[in-house]
Amino acid sequence: MPTKFEDVYGRAVFRFTDHTFLTTCIELKQEVLEKYLMSAIVDFQPACAVNLSDYDLEAKQFNVDLDNEIIEILGLGIAFYWLSAQVLNRQLLRNIIHNKDYTSYSPGNLLNEARGLRETLEQEYRGKINTYSFRHGSIDKLKV
């Protein structure tokens, strides 16, 4: 049974806290998520036991049945690429006033926090790919 892209998007979106992105029109949001999904596929395909390049862009689905572990890794990949785009966003360089105590945060500190979060997410993402490859890999497929 095919796996719809929306199933993967659902795993990624719950990690987002950007309500402006989440309230964006559905077509634009799915277009952006699809681009991030394609990047996650490129990362994960070499280690994945399933052919992730077997998808239909018109039907917005994989032509194969993906298990929960694969969907989780692809969702994490989407979240990683989304956060990477946010770190590169120049709007993070402006000061933001925190409502609680009305103090201005340094744009440099804000950017450092975003980078740290990105690095943490990347470690989790790459770690899940590695763990998956250890569980599903085969020693006879290794090249010398």
Image (spheres, rainbow, N blue to C red):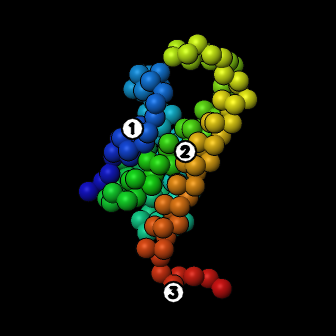
Instruction: Find the distance from the CA under tag 2 to the CA under tag 1.
Output: 13 Å
Q: Is residue 59 visible?
A: no
User: Residue visible at 40% across and 53% down?
Assistant: 72
User: Residue visible at 41% across and 65% down?
Assistant: 50
- Name the disc covering residue 80, or none: 2
Q: Position of residue 11 (x, y in %)?
A: 38, 44
Q: Residue furthest right?
A: 108
Crowd band around label 2 with a 10 angstrom C-alpha radius: few (<14), some (14–19), many (20+): many
Q: Position of residue 60 (x, y in %)?
A: 38, 42
Q: Position of residue 89 (x, y in %)?
A: 66, 28
Looking at the rendered structure, the secondary structure element under dot 1 is loop
- Name the disc covering residue 64, or none: none
User: Residue visible at 48% across and 74% down?
Assistant: 134
Please, what is the three-letter code of the amino acid marked with disc 1?
A: Phe
- Name the disc covering residue 14, or none: 1
Looking at the rendered structure, the secondary structure element under dot 2 is helix
- Name the disc covering residue 140, or none: 3
Query: Which of the 4 quarters of the picture holds residue 86?
Result: top right
Instruction: Find the distance from the CA under tag 3 to the CA under tag 2.
Output: 32 Å
